[in-house]
Amino acid sequence: MKAIDWSEAPESATHYMPSSELFCEAWIKDLKENGYSYIVIDDDNQEWDTARFSRPKAALSLLIQRPEETKPVYSQAMCDEGVSATIGMEVKHQGVTKTVTGNSDANNNVTLLSVNNMYCIAHTNTLEPLTPPIELIDGKAYQFTDVTVTCGVFSSRDDCFHNIDGLVCPEDCTNIQLLEVVK
């Protein structure tokens, strides 16, 4: 099978249909139980057309789903090494995941961020790394960074860490690590 060049696909295409005895090579969108929209590749007409499945099992078995694009993420390791977030990266700012869309001064002290087509300006020292999701276990002890590095026991009932200072919500923390007893 030839490699699929998704950069040539229409933006709304969700699947690729390779040519076969039954089907022409095509980009697919609006895939539903009873039909789909398509554009035949290498056809002069590059408008979306619709079709019904005459042989749905045969068609569905051939379709290749478009891979999800992943944005680069500002990680804890990058933060620990003093690396700054760059344009296009996802960061955490005031508890919300946002995308860095630009730097607004020559020293990169101020960054332009976006979320859901809304923009804000933030000092780069207020950007936090995104931490990969971790499955928290009720009653287990964790080390994490809130304002400082601290520890707490996770309670699934409260959906928070309990520590000497009170309750800490996991979404307000970075670098969450399970603490294990070493014998």
Image (cartoon, grey):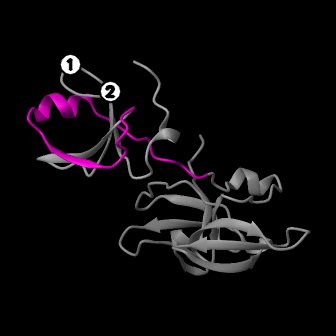
User: Relative to 154, does residue 63 appear above or below in the rendering?
Assistant: above
Q: Amino acid at mark 1?
A: Glu
Q: Which of the two residues, 37 or 16, is positioned nearer the viewer here?
A: 37
- Residue at image position (30%, 24%) is 19
Q: Position of residue 60 (x, y in %)?
A: 20, 34
Mark 2 crowdedness (10 Å alpha carbons): few <14, some 14-19, many ≥20: some
Residue occupying the far left of the picture = 54
Residue 78 against residue 22 in the figure, above or below: below
Q: The magenta stretch spans which residues?
A: 42-71
Relative placement, left or right, of 35 versus 155 is left
Q: Nearer the viewer, residue 7 or 126?
A: 7
In contact (CB < 8 Å): disc 1 and disc 2? no
Q: Is residue 47 magenta?
A: yes
Q: CA distance from mark 1 to mark 2?
A: 10 Å
Q: Left or right of 181: which side holds 105?
A: right
Task: Provide residue 11's location: percent of width, then percent of height.
Answer: 45, 51
Q: Which residue is mark 2?
A: 18
Amino acid at pointer 2? Pro
Q: Position of residue 179 (x, y in %)?
A: 57, 53
